Image: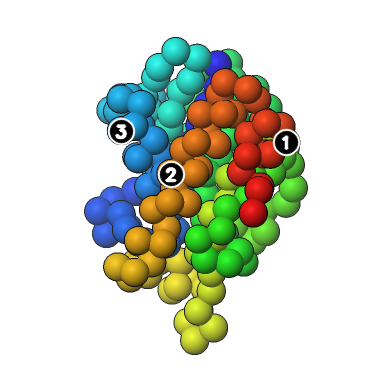
Amino acid sequence: MFLICGLGNKGAAYRYTRHNVGYFVLDRFSEKIGVPLSKKVAGCLVGEADGVLLAVADTFMNLSGGPVSALMRKRHILPEQLLVVHDDLDMQFARMKMRWDGGDGGHKGVRSLMEALHTPLFYRIKIGIGRDPTMPPEDYVLSRFRPDEVVALLPVCEKAGDAISVFMAEGGERAMSLCNRS
């Protein structure tokens, strides 16, 4: 069993913000494979298909670790079976990278998850949202994408979905190889 988790903030006010890229990718992927995120389990909205559990924590970003780790305990999922999709403020806009292990890079949702799991050993797909040097980071991540940015971001979100499919079928190393190509 694999757990694919998108990080973001709950609620309509945050739906199309930069910090919710993880939710957006999971929503699009769940639609693509026909597995709606419709059940509430351990504080997460989940959908389940053969061998995979899709989830978003039904909380705010900074508190994601508690519900995700509770879901993992409930379903007996190990950290190496976890793939987290999240935004990255320090990556160029519309770039994507997948990695295993590492720090939180200042991302409070990832930090919350690492603290709740007591390990940094899980897979991540990071999607670059860039920075606006004229805005404080906490305001920028909660700002909405411009229409031209949405157009540029859609292919990256599709590629993230492809990487998720490869992760489920062929494992993390192969997914990283696909995801990290220029």
- Contact? badges 1 and 2 (CB < 8 Å): no
Secondary structure of residue under mark 2: helix
The x and y percentages for residue 11 are: 28, 51
Q: Is 75 placed above or below 129 here?
A: above
Marks 2 and 3, the one that precedes in the sequence: 3
The x and y percentages for residue 58 are: 37, 40
Label 1 sits on residue = 121
Secondary structure of residue under mark 3: helix
In the rendered structure, which amino acid carries the disc numbered 2?
Glu
Report whether 61 appears left or right of 176: left
Please state which of residues 135 and 61 is positioned toward the viewer in this rendering. Answer: 135
Q: Residues within 10 Å of mark 1 (few under 14, many from 20)?
A: some
Q: Is residue 24 visible?
A: yes
Residue found 46% across the figure and 38% down from its top:
161
Q: Is 116 placed above or below 71 here?
A: below
Foreground: disc 2 or disc 3: 2
Secondary structure of residue under mark 1: loop
Residue found 72% across the figure and 51% down from its top:
103
Marks 3 and 1, the one that precedes in the sequence: 3
User: Residue 100, located in which quarter of the rendered image?
Assistant: top right
Q: Residues within 10 Å of mark 2 (few under 14, many from 20)?
A: some
User: Residue 148, located in which quarter of the rendered image?
Assistant: bottom left
The x and y percentages for residue 59 are: 39, 45
Q: How far apart, in angstroms, are the residues tagged by discs 2 and 3?
A: 12 Å
Query: Quarter holding the N terminus?
Result: top right
Label 3 sits on residue = 31
Label 2 sits on residue = 158
Query: Quarter holding the C terminus?
Result: bottom right
Please state which of residues 28 and 42 is positioned toward the viewer in this rendering. Answer: 28
Foreground: disc 1 or disc 2: 2
Residue found 46% across the figure and 23% down from its top:
53
